[in-house]
Amino acid sequence: MSLRVVALLAACLLLAACNKISQDNYAQLKPGMSKGDVEGLLGKPAECAGALGMSSCTWGDGQRFISVQYANDQVLMFSGKGLK
């Protein structure tokens, strides 16, 4: 596979992931949702961290993101920035 094809495929995957970071998907988040339901809506997060039953996961980057905080794998609260 050529380098150009690999770069094109990587760009398409990145755009597909970014398309899930939207105001429409953010509006579907609700307190109490399971972590699995959130990942079904937004895909796999860019990063997660946590301890003692609490965790925080982020989708996107510093300019455009959705961040979800969990308690025992259920949505406690969430925030977003740069959503369209």
Image (cartoon, grey):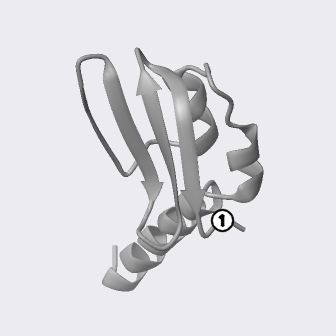
The residue closer to the viewer here, 60 or 56, is 56
The residue closer to the viewer here, 70 or 10, is 70
- Disc 1 marks a residue whose amino acid type is Leu
Q: Where's the N terminus, which quadrant?
A: bottom left
For disc 1, the neighbor class at 10 Å (few under 14, some 14 to 19, many from 20) is some
> In the rendering, at what x and y percent does residue 56 appear?
37, 38
Left or right: 27 in relation to 75: right
- Above or below — where is 36 with respect to 11? above
* Residue 16 appears in the figure: yes
Q: Residue drawn at (73%, 57%), measured in percent from left and top?
A: 23
Q: Residue drawn at (31%, 17%), measured in percent from left and top?
A: 53
Q: Where's the C terminus, which quadrant?
A: bottom right
> In the rendering, at what x and y percent does residue 16 appear?
58, 61
Q: Residue drawn at (26%, 31%), measured in percent from left and top?
A: 50
Q: From the image, tell me which residue sits under label 1.
A: 83
Q: How many marks?
A: 1
> In the rendering, at what x and y percent does residue 15 appear?
56, 68
* Residue 39 appears in the figure: no
Helix, strand or loop at mark 1: loop
Q: Residue drawn at (63%, 38%), measured in percent from left and top?
A: 41
Left or right: 48 in relation to 64: left
Query: In terms of image quadrants, where is residue 71?
Result: top left
Query: In terms of image quadrants, where is residue 7?
Result: bottom left
